[in-house]
């Protein structure tokens, strides 16, 4: 079958444009195989990265039909089945573009420097003390090693970073790839710097609190590392060690759980007052809510009453049960 490949082409600091290539392909052909044929048979100037061709190295990560994926993993048939909406008589189309949140060098090649710099910022290696040469090798039990399995699958392809909304609006946020590696260090039995690491990852919106919980990183990860889940686990480690006075981000989470336990869902009247106003301790914080409160009131958006949800006792019981399970792990 014939397929139209629309590739976003661009040189550094130039306006991007789509260039179309028509290929006769099989449904089982990978996107990378198609790109190779375009380069070899039609346009030798097309630039893209590749290496292993077997979902191991992560080099061929790019945006395929609007989401970040590995070109060596996705094939023509599945792409057309999921994303093609062409009219009768038109050639089916597949669009290919470079990763997001990173500057383009040429065509589908992006500059990964910032990606690697942010990874380095979380110190993704076992602490120096743990790496001192011992009398014998450092042994781990099968259970200790199994805690590293999921995060250890990360191939640093950049798909999660490309889709991250937090990175898009907050350049200081280290990114889901870095925090997934950070979680690997948190649970590594060989590391001796857990408390220092948690303080590092607790740095305002630069660390875990910068995550907007959009789930895009989980959705596109080709290795099922689930970066957002790993960020959540780091948050829980921090929350277990901090009280509500530590920071607004921590207070936000604790107040949310507290209000849900009380009424089955969030009492919006109290939420802002307790989080921003710090349980009535922060006068400036309380005053900062006044303009918003007046606007909501004038437009009939301010909740004047609160009714607990049905099954509040069950909700409270579930929260306590989850806490009990976590404390016993």
Image (spheres, rainbow, N blue to C red):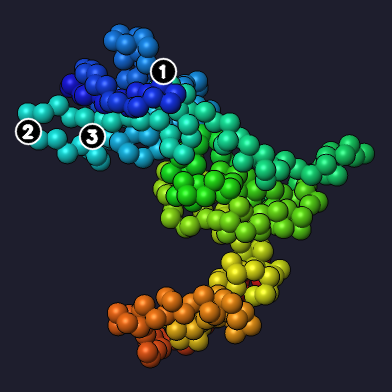
* 244 vs 69: above or below: below
Residue at the spot x=32%, y=11% of the render?
43
Q: Residue at x 60, y 85 (%)?
A: 280
- Position of the C terminus by quadrant: bottom right
Q: Report x, y in % for residue 28.
A: 29, 26
Q: Is residue 147 left or right of residue 15?
A: right
Q: Are marks 3 and 1 in contact (CB under 8 Å)?
A: no
| Residue on which disc 2 sits | 88
Quarter holding the N terminus?
top left
Could you say which disc has been placed on residue 80 in the image? 3
According to the picture, the residue beneath numbered tag 1 turns out to be: 47
Q: Residues within 10 Å of mark 3 (few under 14, many from 20)?
A: some
- Which of the two discs, 2 and 1, labels the residue nearer the N terminus? 1
| Camera-nearest label, 2 or 1 | 1
Q: CA distance from mark 2 to mark 3?
A: 14 Å
Q: Mark 2 vs mark 3: which is more N-terminal?
A: 3
């Amino acid at each position: 079958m014939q397929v139209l490949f629309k590739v976003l082409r661009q040189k550094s600091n130039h306006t991007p444009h789509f260039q179309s290539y028509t290929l006769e392909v099989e449904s089982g052909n990978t996107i990378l195989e198609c790109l190779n044929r375009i380069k070899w048979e039609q346009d030798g100037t097309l630039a893209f990265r590749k290496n292993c061709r077997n979902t191991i190295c992560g080099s061929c990560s790019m945006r395929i039909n609007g989401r970040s994926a590995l070109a060596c993993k996705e094939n023509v048939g599945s792409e057309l089945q999921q994303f093609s909406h062409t009219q009768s008589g038109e050639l089916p189309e597949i669009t290919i573009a470079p990763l997001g949140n990173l500057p383009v060098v040429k065509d589908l090649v992006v500059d990964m420097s910032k990606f690697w710099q942010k990874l380095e910022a979380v110190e993704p290696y076992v602490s120096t003390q743990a790496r001192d040469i011992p009398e014998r090798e450092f042994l781990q039990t099968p259970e200790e090693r199994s805690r590293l399995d999921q995060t250890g699958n990360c191939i640093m392809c950049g798909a999660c970073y490309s889709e991250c909304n937090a990175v898009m609006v907050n350049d200081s946020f280290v990114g889901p790839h870095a925090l997934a590696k950070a979680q690997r260090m948190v649970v590594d039995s060989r590391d001796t710097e857990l408390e220092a690491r948690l303080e590092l990852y607790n740095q305002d919106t630069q660390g875990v609190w910068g995550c907007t919980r959009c789930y895009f990183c989980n959705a596109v990860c080709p290795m099922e590392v689930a970066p957002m889940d790993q960020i959540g686990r780091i948050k829980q480690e921090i929350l277990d060690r901090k009280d509500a006075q530590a920071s607004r981000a921590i207070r936000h989470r604790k107040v949310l759980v507290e209000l849900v336990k009380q009424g089955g869902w969030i009492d919006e009247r109290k939420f802002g007052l307790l989080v921003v106003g710090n349980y009535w301790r922060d006068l400036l914080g309380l005053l900062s809510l006044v303009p918003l409160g007046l606007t909501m009131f004038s437009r009939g958006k301010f909740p004047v009453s609160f009714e607990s949800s049905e099954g509040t006792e069950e909700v409270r019981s579930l929260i306590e049960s989850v806490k009990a399970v976590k404390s016993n792990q």
